[in-house]
Image (spheres, grey):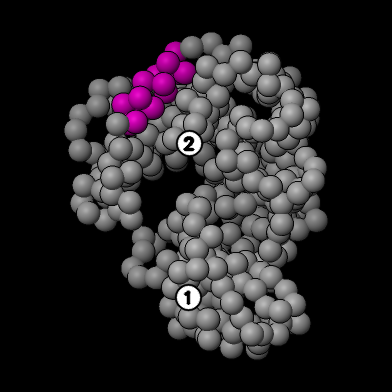
Amino acid sequence: MSNDTNLDLAAVDTYLSAHLSGYKGPLEATKFTVGQSNPTFELRTPEAAYVLRRKPPGVLLKSAHAVDREFRVQRALSGSQVPVPEMFLLCEDDTVIGSAFYVMERLHGRVFPEPTLQGESNETRTAVLKEMNRVLAGLHMVDIDAVGLSDFGPAGNYYERQISRWTKQYRASETSVIEDMDALATELVRSVPADDGQRTLVHGDYRIDNLMFAPDGTDCIGVLDWELSTIGHPYADLAAVIMQWQLPPGKQGRGLAGIDRASLGLPSDQDFVAQYCKRRGLPGIDNFGFYLAFNFFRMAGILQGVYKRALDGNASDPERAKAYGAYVPLFARHGLEALRSTFN
């Protein structure tokens, strides 16, 4: 965390004094330095701690940084199989601190930056990955009608909509011809599976470092960073986990490629998918390579956008953003390989 808050503490203190039950200043704040696109702060008073998450100030894309959606989905999940922090209040009045924000419970626990869970025992690794699987299956079994989220995303084929969206995003930020990316976009459109009727809440960025675990155990106490959540198809979240694991280990890839998983107590891709299917009562998943390829395509589109912003001088970390450009052809190639392979 950083002490550079760039947050109007006096305005926050005044607002919370008027709107948050039990709140009593004085107030201090520290900004979290981990890479969330919505600036996030720890708020501290002599008696309590909270987390404030806000839209970045300034002009933004219409659908970007929707903290109101983050607040809504987490409040709806309170008491469900999906652990989330308690939501205290949402302020959509931009005049208070310059952009909308919400305040939630400050959780205290462990976040593992990589799926290798370095320094942990094999028993802990096995238990954490099983818990990650349980929470994901639980997320996809939430009754979206019962929790008031049936309108949280549009109707229609999720993959057709997403492929169209990310193709447009990629074309808008394209800087050179990448033949594998063009081929992947074309083949994905041709390969969209028939609608199987599954319409669930999806997290959109489900990975180990977006989960918080108990300080002294392996229970998940919070699923974090709901910025990309919507109503969609559950296999997109499941395949996103597997996609991440197929990347190189370390701070950049944060994957498991080349790792002897069995020696570390970590599941294979197939074992993780099988666990998930058992939890949801599914016989298996046909054509899993499509869902994997879709995730590689979407991530390639995201990375190309970051790269283009770096070239345009609009990236917060230009050198790192430029480095991402080199990964776009790699992700496109992985996507084609996944689409043309048999996952078993």
Quadrant of the rendering where the C terminus is positioned: top right
**Residue 65: x and y, percent?**
46, 60
- Residue 229 sits above or below residue 190 on the image: below
Q: CA distance from mark 2 to mark 1?
A: 29 Å
Residue 251: image tag: 2
* Residue 210 within the magenta-colored segment of the rendering: no
Name which residue lies at 68% across and 16% down: 263
Report the predominant secondary structure element of the magenta stretch: helix
**Residue 178: x and y, percent?**
24, 27
Residue 51 appears in which quarter of the rendering?
bottom right
Give the amino acid at mark 2. Lys
Residue for badge 1: 7
Image label count: 2
Element marked by disc 1: loop
**Residue 86: x and y, percent?**
72, 63
Q: Which region is colored magenta?
A: 327-340
Specify which label sits upstream in the sequence, 2 or 1: 1
